[in-house]
């Protein structure tokens, strides 16, 4: 038995795990905004990609998608290591 706090991980369609446009990210985003699963952190690869493109509009969208995915992957590993709850859509 451990005294570590419980960790919640929700993965909504990461790495091809669902049909595009099915609403996976939307459902997780609503849960995050409503703080239903607080204090879980919400990681949205689409949002990260949009932020990257806003800062670097000259960047190829495929490169921005890859950079967004890489950032979210690194955050997932960091949060797992820190035993923090998170959701990704």
Image (cartoon, grey):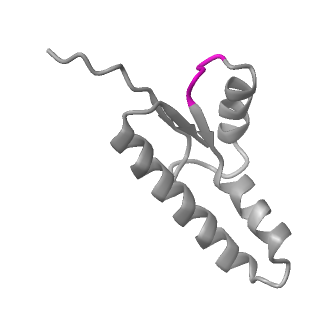
Q: Is 68 situated above or below 78?
A: below
Position of 8 with respect to 14 (left or right) is left
Question: Which quarter of the image is occupied by the N terminus?
Answer: top left
Position of 3 with respect to 44 (left or right) is left
Question: Which quarter of the image is occupied by the C terminus?
Answer: top right
Position of 67 with respect to 15 (left or right) is right
Position of 64 with respect to 18 (left or right) is right
Figure quadrant of residue 82? top left
Q: Nearer the viewer, residue 75 or 88?
A: 75
Residue that appears at 44% across and 33% down? 84
Residue that appears at 55% across and 46% down? 13
**Residue 33 on the magenta segment:** no
Tell me how many marks there are. Answer: 0
Figure quadrant of residue 79? top left
Predominant SS of the magenta segment: loop
Q: Position of residue 70 (x, y in %)?
A: 53, 65
Q: Nearer the viewer, residue 11 or 1?
A: 1
Q: Is 51 situated above or below 27?
A: below
Q: Is 51 situated above or below 24?
A: below
Please state the extent of the stretch shown in magenta in the rendering.
36-40
Q: In the displayed image of the protein, which residue is found farthest to the left?
A: 1
Q: Position of residue 49 (x, y in %)?
A: 71, 63
Residue that appears at 74% across and 67% down? 52
Q: Position of residue 18 (x, y in %)?
A: 56, 47
Q: Position of residue 2 (x, y in %)?
A: 18, 18
């Amino acid at each position: 038995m451990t005294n570590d706090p419980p960790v919640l991980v929700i993965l909504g369609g990461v790495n091809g795990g669902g049909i595009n446009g099915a609403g996976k990210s939307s459902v997780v985003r609503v849960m995050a905004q409503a703080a239903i699963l607080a204090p879980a952190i919400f990681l949205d690869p689409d949002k990260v990609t949009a932020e990257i493109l806003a800062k670097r509009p000259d960047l190829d969208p495929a490169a921005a998608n890859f950079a967004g995915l890489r950032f979210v992957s690194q955050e997932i590993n960091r949060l797992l290591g820190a035993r923090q709850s998170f959701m990704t859509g």
